[in-house]
Amino acid sequence: MSSLFDKYAPLQTRVDMMMKIGQDALGVQFDDILDATRGRIGNREILLAGTNNYLGLTFDEDCMKAAQKAVESHGTGTTGSRVANGSYAEHIDLEKALADHLGMPSCIVFTTGYQTNLAAIAGLAGDKDVIFMDADAHACIIDGTRLTGASTIRFRHNSPEDLDKRLKRRGEIEGGNALVVIEGMYSMFGDIAPVDEFVDVTHRHGGYLYIDEAHSYGVFGPTGCGIAEEQGVLDKIDFISGTFSKSLASVGGFCASRHKEFEITRKIMRPYMFTASATPSNIAAARAAVEKVKAGGHLRSNLKERAQQLHAGLKEMGYDLCADASPVIAVRRPNEAVAAMEWNWLIENGVYVNLAVPPGTPQSSSLLRISLSAAHTEENINAILKAFGELKSAQGEMMQNMAAKLAAE
């Protein structure tokens, strides 16, 4: 008789290979987080270069005090959804603050960033609509489309031209609309979308543009609103989603719209209606962080400088980088085994990055993914570069060791 888990045998084989090479790169346990750029595993201090803590606000004094005060005032949890248990004043205040920052009349806050796209996309697209989705869309976007009855058409990554062709080919959507979904900065490669061109193509065909700025809110634009603001088209975006777990140093998410009618979707979005609302501490921390984002020009400036420094250094060493300089720098490796081996070497030598492998990566790539923070210093970047330089020198010996480990039973 077959087991319910037999279908995971190929995945188990990959995990077994990873464990032969070293530790589980997808299940790291930190014994302590010391600050925005330092952690501890056992007695070893680790330089954190894979946390998505773009503005370094997780240890910001104002954000921490706001969270602590919220717990003291409202307790640790909300114990139900906003539909069932009502909204706290803090939920509504955060929605207003985000809407004002983005210059949009409507904003809905969710309990997680993943849930945001799941709820909003499923709430917006109906049976007669068609979703046009970038080929490299995040898992939560893909899953959001699966909750709808809408048809889904993928277009080539970051290609307004291919979108234009597919919208023309699809023609007029009888009784429905086109919803185009893209991201601002893509989380794996760190590449930037030509949002201004997507606005033009989408609206020329009468569609609605939905942009996920999860990795770019707080990071780009004069006031930190993201790539749309950076490219001067923020006021033309129909829907913009984001997360609290990156620049806003908390847990949660939001979707804002220039269409005030978006408010009606609160009544039908199942992931919003049937999930407990965000805790007081998460909401309060994110609310304080919004003010830091608005005034964070100096943080964005340092983040940009550190990204350029690291990108230039890695490129000079001959590493294959997936995109131009941005806060996410992905180093392409030959295969999953090599990437896992090198990830283990880096963490053993005091630098934590992300191991990113298929199916969660574009083009079936195996990556060492680095995400930088405004809290990183020039010295921190030099330390990362030193580690990658030594990694390159050690590759021959590592390959021999890896071959021996994989051959051993």
Image (cartoon, rainbow, N blue to C red):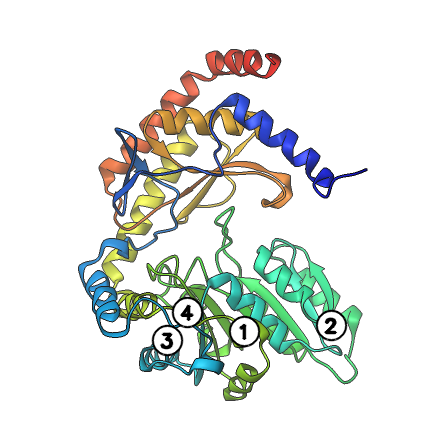
Check whether the beta carbons of the residues at disc 2 and disc 4 lie within 8 A of each other. no
Q: Name the residue located 48 percent from the left edge and 24 percent from the top edge.
A: 22
Query: Which is in the foreground here, disc 3 or disc 4?
Result: 3
Q: Amino acid at mark 3?
A: Leu
Q: Amino acid at mark 1?
A: Phe
- Mark 1 or mark 3: which comes first in sequence? 3
Q: Which residue is mark 3?
A: 98
Q: Amino acid at mark 2?
A: Gly
Q: Which residue is mark 1?
A: 274
Measured as percent of width and height from the top left, residue 118 is found at: 58, 66
- SS category of the residue bearing label 4: helix
- SS category of the residue bearing label 3: helix
Query: Which is in the foreground here, disc 2 or disc 1?
Result: 1
Q: Which residue is mark 4?
A: 229
Query: In the image, which disc is placed on residue 394?
Result: none
Mark 2 Cα-neighbour bin, 10 Å: few <14, some 14–19, many ≥20: some
Q: Name the residue located 52 percent from the left edge and 74 percent from the top edge.
A: 272
Measured as percent of width and height from the top left, residue 210 is found at: 56, 71
Check whether the beta carbons of the residues at disc 1 and disc 3 lie within 8 A of each other. no
Instruction: Tell me: residue 181, above or below residue 49.
Output: below
Query: Which is in the foreground here, disc 2 or disc 4?
Result: 2
Q: Amino acid at mark 4?
A: Glu
Query: Which is in the foreground here, disc 1 or disc 4?
Result: 1
